[in-house]
Amino acid sequence: MEADYSTTPPGSSVDKHCRDQLILYLPDHAVDLVNIFGWLWIRFSIAYGIVRLGSN
């Protein structure tokens, strides 16, 4: 499957704008992102533990 660069060529201003927005977003929301992924990891670990105990 090939990418269609007819609308957005590689290295376009759209790509640069997305990168700039990401660079601005990540530091401002780093704590929130770590918190969200931490809770997801905890929930996954608990669910995995329950499934594992149920299969024994």
Image (tube, rainbow, N blue to C red):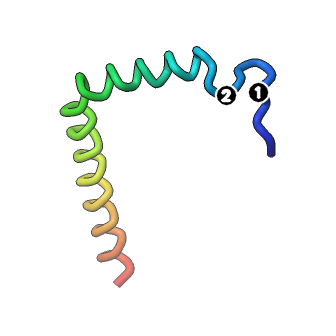
Percent x, y of residue 55: 38, 79
Residue at coordinates 27% horizontally, 35% vertically from top-left? Answer: 33
Q: CA distance from mark 2 to mark 1?
A: 7 Å
- Does the CB distance between marks 2 and 1 fall below 8 Å? yes
Which residue is the site of mark 2? 10
Q: Is residue 17 above or below residue 5?
A: above
Q: Earlier in the sequence, mark 2 or mark 1?
A: 1
* Residue type (three-letter) at the residue carrying disc 2: Pro
Disc 1 element: loop
Disc 2 element: loop
Residue at coordinates 79% horizontally, 30% vertically from top-left? Answer: 4
Is 26 on the left or on the right of 31, as rendered? right
Q: Residues within 10 Å of mark 1 (few under 14, many from 20)?
A: few
Percent x, y of residue 24: 32, 20
Q: Is residue 26 above or below residue 49?
A: above
* Residue type (three-letter) at the residue carrying disc 1: Tyr
Which residue is the site of mark 1? 5
Residue 49: name its quadrant. bottom left
Percent x, y of residue 31: 19, 33
Q: Is residue 4 above or below residue 36?
A: above
Residue at coordinates 23% horizontally, 45% vertically from top-left? Answer: 39
Is 19 on the left or on the right of 13, as rendered? left
Q: Is the N terminus in the top left, top right, bottom left or bottom right quadrant?
A: top right
